[in-house]
Image (cartoon, rainbow, N blue to C red):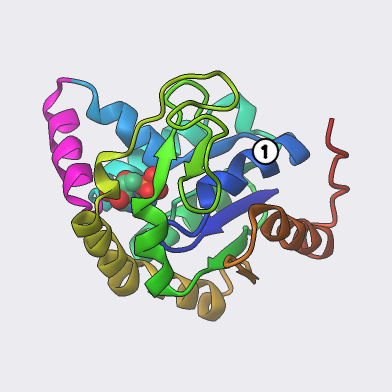
């Protein structure tokens, strides 16, 4: 099973990915997380990526495609995987189709989490993350129990550099202009199935909708929560 979590920045992909990972027992791969790790390296590629992330610009396809291809070749992906944040361009979608075909994976199910654009800037600038366990909070809609501290491990929460209002506008523009056409690629070229989910609901309700879509389209039993 190959799942693609797709939608604009701030639509809730990073919140849903670990829930799906836990229920289905497949690895959740985030190209954003992979690139943030690369950006910490002091190599010339690390520095290039660092500058692009800070500006809210997309990293070139050749770099992201190479990193993703290497990750998909790891043994834990053999029974399927979930990707959050890729493909973000039609070139990446084409590349992914070739890679999936060469590795004999089925066509993907793309889960499109739709949230009206005017809500996204507010969501992004209110987002705080736990650097310890990766939990995501929103000071307006899902605040931590104790201000500034993670509910799970009490690590001090931080904000991503690219969650500022100015950078968020640039990321949304990139989504509109370059990423949104990827939906057309899947619809038109038969690259896989597309389901549309209303992302403007509580995370629990969004997850319910995703679960129903998985049961219909992927025909896998969804595990009971432990
Ligand atoms: P995310 O964590 O998914 O919000 O991604 C954070 C940033 O990483 C994005 O704003 C881009 O700069 C970069 N990025 C993540 N995934 C991709 C991708 N598939 N293609 C190009 N850039 C990406």
Foreground pick, 91 / 81: 81
Compared with residue 22, is residue 116 higher up or lower down, i.e. above or below?
Answer: below
Compared with residue 198, is residue 85 higher up or lower down, i.e. above or below?
Answer: above
User: Is 37 positioned to the left or the right of 68 in the image?
Assistant: left
Span shown in magenta: 42-58
| Magenta region includes residue 95 | no
Foreground pick, 66 / 136: 136
Any part of residue 88 in sight: no
Residue designated by label 1: 21
Foreground pick, 110 / 21: 21
Which residue is drawn at the image coordinates 33% and 73% (left, top)? Answer: 176
Which residue is drawn at the image coordinates 53% and 36% (left, top)? Answer: 144
Which residue is drawn at the image coordinates 84% and 30% (left, top)? Answer: 226
Residue 142 percent across, percent down from the top left:
55, 47
| Magenta region includes residue 45 | yes
Disc 1 is placed on an element classified as helix
Residue 198 percent across, percent down from the top left:
62, 70
Label 1 residue near ligand 1, CB within 8 Å: no
Which residue is drawn at the image coordinates 71% and 54% (left, top)? Answer: 207
Residue 66 percent across, percent down from the top left:
34, 39
The majority secondary structure of the magenta stretch comes to helix
Compared with residue 51, is residue 217 higher up or lower down, i.e. above or below?
Answer: below
- How many C-alpha atoms fall within 10 Å of the one at disc 1: few (<14), some, or many (≥20)? some
Residue at the limit of the structure toward the bottom, as seen here: 188
């Amino acid at each position: 099973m190959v799942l693609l979590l797709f939608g604009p920045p701030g639509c809730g992909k990073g919140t849903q990915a670990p829930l799906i990972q836990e229920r289905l027992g497949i690895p959740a791969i985030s190209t954003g997380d992979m690139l943030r790790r690369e950006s910490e390296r002091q190599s010339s590629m690390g520095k290039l990526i660092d500058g692009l992330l800070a500006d809210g610009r997309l990293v070139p396809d050749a770099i992201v495609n190479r990193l993703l291809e290497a990750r998909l070749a790891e043994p834990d992906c053999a029974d399927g995987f979930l990707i959050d944040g890729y493909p973000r361009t039609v070139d990446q979608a084409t590349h992914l189709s070739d890679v999936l075909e060469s590795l004999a994976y089925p066509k993907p199910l793309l889960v499109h989490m739709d949230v009206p654009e005017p809500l996204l800037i507010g969501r992004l600038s209110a987002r705080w993350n736990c650097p310890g366990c990766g939990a995501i909070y929103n000071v307006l809609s899902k605040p931590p129990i104790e201000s500034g501290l993670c509910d799970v491990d009490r690590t001090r929460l931080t904000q991503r550099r690219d969650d500022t209002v100015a950078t968020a506008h640039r990321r949304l523009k990139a989504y509109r202009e370059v990423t949104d056409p990827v939906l057309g690629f899947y619809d038109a070229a038969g690259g896989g199935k597309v389901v549309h989910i209303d992302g403007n609901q509580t995370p629990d309700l969004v997850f319910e909708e995703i679960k129903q879509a998985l049961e219909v389209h992927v025909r896998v039993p969804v595990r009971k929560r432990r």
